[in-house]
Amino acid sequence: MNPKALSSSFGHFLKRFTLVAILASIVLLLLSGYAASKLYERYVVRLAESNAINLTEAIFTTYQSDLNSALDSAPLLPPQLLALNKTLRDFIQPYGIVKIKLFSPSGIIIYSTDLSIIGKDASANEMLKQALIRGASSNIQRKDQIRDLANETRFDVDVVESYVAMKNQKGALIGVFEIYQDTSGFRGEVQQGIVLFVGVLAIILFSVFGTAFVFMRKAVKKMIYQQEMLEELATVDAVTGLYNRAEITRRMEAEWQRYKRSSSKQSSFALLMLDLDHFKKVNDNYGHLVGDKLLQLVAHRLMGELRSYSAIGRYGGEEFIALIPDISYASAQQVADRLLRLVSQSKYSISGYELSMSVSIGFAVAEPTDLNLDALIKRADDALYDAKQSGRGCIVGAEGATPVSKALPNK
């Protein structure tokens, strides 16, 4: 995968990662908030149930004889009912109780602060059944409105409903108390606790995902950079910085395919093959380091002279090949002439030496008679051979399949 495609791919990956991280954080925060509210709710229910058990024990201990009498003589007559009602109301008044009920073991309501329901059968009540089996059962409810012991209506109230079994000294079940406790005061504390918990969790998630994003982004940049380096190593000549033979050949092949697909062959392309004359003498006389530096300077000047959409590569030791799209034979000859003058009329200062260099150029323009790219390259190579045989430092262009035309030497 090339660096641009890799960068785009990782860019999309980081965007998806960010989106997934945000959605996952939102879901996690919502679930955590819900779980925290349930935990707080469970705590409130257990606390209220513990209070209800303690209150039941206190009532039974204080008014054991009255309760036994009420349970034994049910249904209660008005005088006994009113006396029990006053006794129990006075006792539970300081504890914030909203309502209480007293059930017989069979589930009949013996007493309630709501006198209208006394005598009803509640044996089908599931929570009552659980209390008869386990000794206590509680749940929390939100009431839109409820009447308290003072007969006042309260609105939007959280109530914990607790069923607590009563046993005598022998351990026999004698009845069940149902106690309604107003726990609305806990609501604000619960909400504050949940907000604090979710807030802290959000900070942790932001830190974790933020840190992961930063590390991933750095890793992605490093991978892209390494990919660019690998891409450069695979396509660029290490000495000159031009395209290497494999890459310039790939680009020539792509241009050839474009040319062959074109319905009109008027828009052709040219290949210019350039060979530095007597370059071996530079290596022999000055060393390979000077020779490499000379190749770099020549390559830099050639690259600067060509159009941005042209391409040039190192085709061999001191041989270069230039690909010039959308050009005619005459224009290609003009380009070759400029390149020859650029190389031959320049001085190269390298490691204290003043060097001069000439170049031989052979070129060919793609024609319908070319069977393939190799045929076109061979025509340009043959033209270069003729240029070198003609005394070097000159240009030879190939017209048609075999003939060549020679430009005047530029020395």
Image: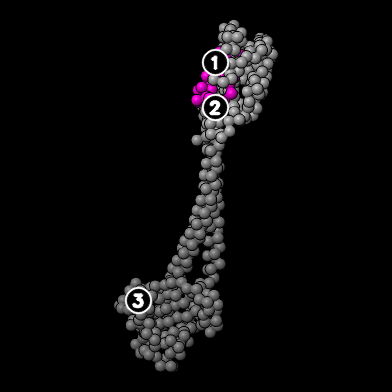
- Figure quadrant of residue 322: top right
Task: Look at mark 1 in the image and give the residue it sits on.
Answer: 382
- Number of numbered markers: 3
**Is residue 150 found left or right of 127 in the rendered image?**
right
Task: Look at mark 3 in the image and give the residue it sits on.
Answer: 129
Q: Looking at the image, is 120 positioned above or below residue 6?
A: below
Query: In x, y percent, where is residue 351?
Result: 64, 12
Q: Report, in whole angstroms, how far the alpha carbon at label 3 lies from the one at label 1.
A: 106 Å
Local crowd size for mark 1, using a 10 Å CA cut-off: few (<14), some (14–19), many (≥20): many
Image: magenta residue range: 360-385
Query: In x, y percent, where is residue 240?
Result: 59, 20
Q: Earlier in the sequence, mark 2 or mark 1?
A: 2
Q: Looking at the image, is 384 positioned above or below residue 23?
A: above
Check contact, mark 3 vs mark 1: CB within 8 A.
no
Residue 368 painted magenta: yes
Q: Looking at the image, is 409 positioned above or below residue 306?
A: above
- Figure quadrant of residue 307: top right
Residue 141's label in the rendered image is none
Q: Earlier in the sequence, mark 3 or mark 2?
A: 3
Type of the residue with mark 1: Asp
**Is residue 356 found left or right of 283 in the rendered image?**
right
Q: Residue at x 52, y 56 (%)?
A: 26
Residue nearest the viewer, comparing 229 with 195: 229
Task: Look at mark 2 in the image and give the residue it sits on.
Answer: 368
Query: In x, y percent, where is residue 109?
Result: 39, 84
Q: Looking at the image, is 373 positioned above or below residue 409?
A: below
Coloring scheme of the render? one colour
Residue 93 painted magenta: no
Q: Is residue 109 visible?
A: yes
